[in-house]
Amino acid sequence: MITPKSLFLAGLMATTMPAMAFAAHGGMSAAPASSSPGSVSTVGSGAAATSPTGSAATGGTAGSAAVGGTSVSTEGLGATSAGPTGTNASLGVAGTASGGIRDKASDRIKERPNGSMSGVDRARASAGHGVWSRSDTRVRDKKNGDIVSRTRSAYHEPGGPPVTSTSTIDTGH
């Protein structure tokens, strides 16, 4: 039998381990190294289970981008469990920005009147002259117990369009 606690721990590991491995190895290149020194990547994972006594879901997304000495990363994780004694939900977001002349990371979590929770994290770093990297993560613990998370990461160098990556998970689908 899968318990809500084991499901939460499995989802937490599945969501954060790829992001930590990504950070440790410098990410995956969006283009061949010879044509672009930048990198961008996103990852997501989620799981849900139901039983006669309740349900549980966990999931999240993470991403990072780097170019021209700038580096940003964001991640979000949500978890819910429902059973005979009630419903529990938790949510977390985090992010960093560094290496630029204008770096900013911000996050917020709020509980909505309908019983759901949402969190947003944004990270931006600019080296000036059109060189920037950014990442945005949004995660929501829905009232029905589903987790929805989306991360968009991008970098830009002059002379071309932004290079982007997006990951989305929805434990209800």
Image: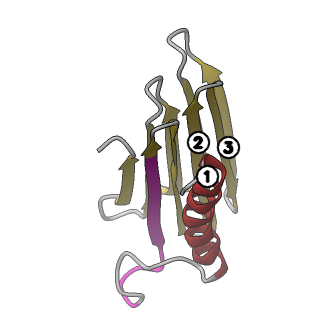
Numbered tag placed on residue 121 in the rendering: none
Numbered tag placed on residue 8 in the rendering: 1
> Looking at the rendering, in which quadrant would you find the C terminus?
top left
- Earlier residue among tags 1 and 3: 1
Numbered tag placed on residue 105 in the rendering: 3
For the point 32% across and 65% down, the residue is 159
The answer, for residue 119, to whether it is visible in the render is no
For the point 67% across and 37% down, the residue is 106
Q: Secondary structure at mark 3?
A: strand
Report the side of 173 relative to 67 (left or right). Answer: left
Residue 152 vertical position relative to residue 22 in the rendered view, above or below: above
- The residue tagged 2 is 79
The amino acid marked with disc number 2 is Ala
Q: Secondary structure at mark 1?
A: helix
Query: Could you tell me residue 74's position as x and y percent?
Result: 59, 52
Q: Main secondary structure of the magenta part?
A: strand
Q: Secondary structure at mark 2?
A: strand
Query: Could you tell me residue 84's position as x and y percent?
Result: 59, 26
- Please give the range of residues in magenta: 34-49
Residue 36 forms part of the magenta stretch: yes
As rendered, which of 99 and 48 lies closer to the eye? 48
For the point 46% across and 63% down, the residue is 43
Q: CA distance from mark 1 to mark 3?
A: 27 Å
The amino acid marked with disc number 1 is Phe
Mark 2 neighbour class, 10 Å CA radius: few under 14, some 14 to 19, many 20 or more: many
Q: CA distance from mark 3 to mark 2?
A: 23 Å
Q: Residue furthest top?
A: 113
Residue contact between numbered discs 2 and 1, judged by CB atoms under 8 Å: yes
The amino acid marked with disc number 3 is Ala
